[in-house]
Amino acid sequence: MMKIIKKPITRRLMLGGTAAAALSRPNLIRAQTSSVPIRIGLLSDVGGPYRNAGGLGAKIAVELALEDFGGSLLSRPVEIVQADIQNKPDLASAKAREWIDSGFNVLVDGGATSSGLAVQEVTREKKTIFLGNGPSATELSGKLCSPYGFHFWADTYSLAKGTGGALTRAGGTSWFFITADYQFGYSLQANTEQFIKAAGGQILGSVRVPLGATDFSSALLQARASGAKVVGFANAGADLQNCIKQAAEFGIVKAGQSLATLLMFVTDVVALGQDVCEGLVLTNSFYWDLTPKTRAWTERFVKRMGLPPTMIQAADYSAALHWMRAAQSAGSLDGDVVAARMHALPVTDFHHDNAPIQSNGQLLTPVYVWRVKPSTQATHKWDFYQPIATIEGKDAFTPLDQTGCKL
């Protein structure tokens, strides 16, 4: 009987001794803790229609942010992982849940609006920060906003305010829309219509086309038959490129109609060619050739990507850097703590100067309206745009009391 009692007592003493020895070596404990990596997960469209808008370039942007932050966070290494969610909401939400459950600390990107909104729902439930720079629909920071969700570039409201307002005031008083058939397209068209009508314009019709379509002939024929002065493309990426190419084949512009690109990335101009895009009006929240600082950062990005950075990729850099600064300042990775710190700190980096974040997670970044200039006027590589207008961040986005966000 004594032996039965004595054995567990001996085990307890041994365990107590081990714990005491470990506690007498706090440096060892800290070293063991700091060896566990912090994990940043990018849920992206790597091979689909938005692959050049975010895609692999989004991961490069976050890697640059980590380098500029110093390579580690809270004395721990940082691991950056990317998955291709193919713009599918079910795949995106499943991967988000899997990653958070396995210890990922923050999620980035989100791909298309539909998949990004699915990710935001998971991160809301799991109280995990989501730097949702893939989507652009206002719902992300509007009626479907999240206390853990952040958006660092233009949305469909600010894009519509820039291009829709500018073209209508310039005489484009009647519009026909070719719209991506999901929430992003609906949001972009609805927001643009708002500014067209406010400027005295009218809507003559619209047609919806599925995401990833390659044949826009029927839609373009309807646009031409409408007699609208402006044909608005409420789509993006490869869909937009196909629209512009096929519009040229149908002679839309030669017949007297104008084209409005409501969400166009610099990589679209690279792909199509400056001559094909000449005269197109667009709005964005970042252009690589703005300042010496944006040009210097772009040089680093191009060495790895081979293409100029888009506004989504620049936003991923800014958001990731701001998240790291907030976590470091708070001394925590807790979603509630870091979110509060992100809201409290203004955003400062190579293209922001003390920009505030609203309570709905939207960064008040400036928005720029451009026209693609003739290639004969370009003085250097990727010198695409001539400025039309700048909208300050405080004026570019939906007023908070109109967003529908309950935060």
Image (cartoon, helix red, strand yellow):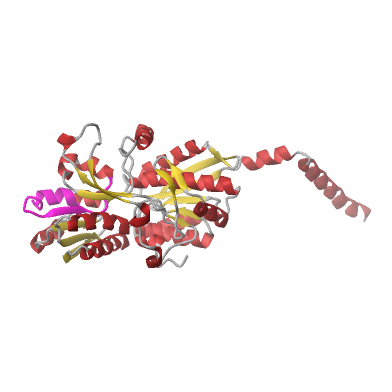
Is residue 103 found inside the magenta-colored segment of the image?
no
Query: Residue at the location (25% across, 55% down)?
Result: 235
Instruction: State the image quarter where residue 132 is shown.
Output: bottom left
Q: Position of residue 377 (x, y in %)?
A: 17, 35
In the rendered image, which quarter is residue 274 located in?
Answer: top left
Which residue is situated farthest in the left direction here?
255
Image quadrant assignment for residue 308: top left
Tell which of 404 and 107 is nearer to you: 404
Question: Residue at 34% of width from left, 59% of height from top?
Answer: 137
- Picture coordinates of residue 45, whole percent (x, y): 36, 49
For the record, the magenta segment spans 243-265
| Residue at the right extreme of this rendering | 2
User: How far across and how far down the image is residue 227, in percent?
Assistant: 9, 62
Horizontal side of 385 relative to 70 (left or right) equals left
Q: Residue at x 92, y 56 (%)?
A: 1
Residue 82 visible in the displayed image: no
In-image side of 341 versus 91 (left or right): right
